[in-house]
């Protein structure tokens, strides 16, 4: 079997332009100008790192915290059970929270996280996701801010992995396995 090839779906430049536009959309939506950004690990870390710098360009000065969530996966689909592997250090009560993750797929992971933050008293929880795969949705949840609508393919790069590989790619791609 030869080395897998990666087909580029969204280039580094396209992602950077979209991040700047999303930051402007977030600012225009009337978000608190000192919100709490909650980056969901691991997949959301590259997007969150770029988005907070784009938010700076839009005049927003966020606080940043991290949450590690695991939705147990069998192969490439999630099972629906979500566990908090690393919790926030910040009290979210009364805060405007921007929950940032890589992909909204079934929606189970982010539906769980959003409800958890609301239960803890967050004033507002808005979702910013790099990719939306609407055809895969199971939970009743939509993101207020979406980078790109993704084709129904397993994607890698820009923080997203396949078997712990490819997170370092500076673009979003699709792995083509050929024999
Ligand atoms: P959901 O709970 O089904 O919405 O799961 C979304 C999570 O599954 C994302 O945050 C990713 O960590 C992971 N995931 C879903 N689709 C992909 C993909 O195409 N590539 C890499 N990770 C994915
Ligand atoms: Mg994830």
Image: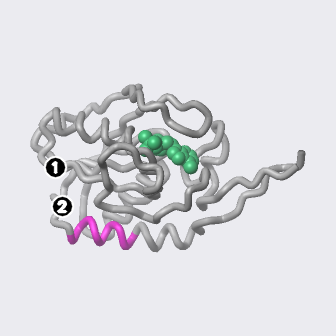
Picture quarter with the N terminus = top right
Q: Position of residue 123 (x, y in %)?
A: 12, 46
In-image side of 95 versus 46 (left or right)? left
Q: Which residue is mark 1?
A: 124
Vertically, is 121 above or below 45?
above
Count neighbours of disc 2 (C-alpha within 10 A) and say few if under 14, some if 14 to 19, many if 20 or more: some
**Marker disc for residue 33:** none
Which residue is rendered at x = 37% and y = 65% of the image? Answer: 54
Q: Secondary structure at mark 2?
A: loop
Q: Position of residue 47 (x, y in %)?
A: 46, 55
Observer-nearest of 5 and 95:
5
- The reply to whether residue 102 is visible in this rendering is no
Label whose residue precedes the other's in the sequence (1 or 2): 2
- Asked if labels 2 and 1 touch by Cβ distance under 8 angstroms, the answer is yes
Observer-nearest of 96 and 139:
139
The mark closer to the camera, 1 or 2, is: 1
- The reply to whether residue 29 is visible in this rendering is yes
Observer-nearest of 21 and 162:
162
Q: Which residue is mark 2?
A: 31
């Amino acid at each position: 079997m030869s080395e897998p090839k990666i087909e580029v779906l969204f280039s580094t430049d396209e992602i950077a332009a979209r991040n700047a536009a999303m930051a402007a959309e977030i600012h225009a939506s009337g978000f608190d100008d000192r919100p709490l950004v909650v980056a969901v690990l691991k997949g959301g870390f590259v997007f969150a790192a770029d988005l907070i710098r784009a938010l700076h360009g839009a005049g927003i000065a966020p606080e940043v915290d991290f949450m590690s969530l695991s939705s147990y996966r069998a192969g490439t689909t999630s099972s629906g059970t979500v566990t908090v592997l690393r919790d926030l250090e910040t009290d979210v009560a009364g805060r405007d929270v921007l929950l940032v993750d890589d992909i909204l797929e079934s929606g189970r992971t982010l539906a769980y996280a959003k409800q958890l933050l609301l239960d803890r008293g967050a004033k507002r929880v808005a979702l910013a996701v790099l990719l939306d795969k609407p055809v895969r949705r199971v939970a009743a949840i939509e993101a207020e801010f979406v980078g790109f609508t993704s084709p129904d393919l397993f994607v890698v790069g820009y923080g997203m992995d396949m078997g712990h590989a490819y997170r370092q790619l500076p673009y979003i791609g699709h792995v083509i396995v050929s024999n």
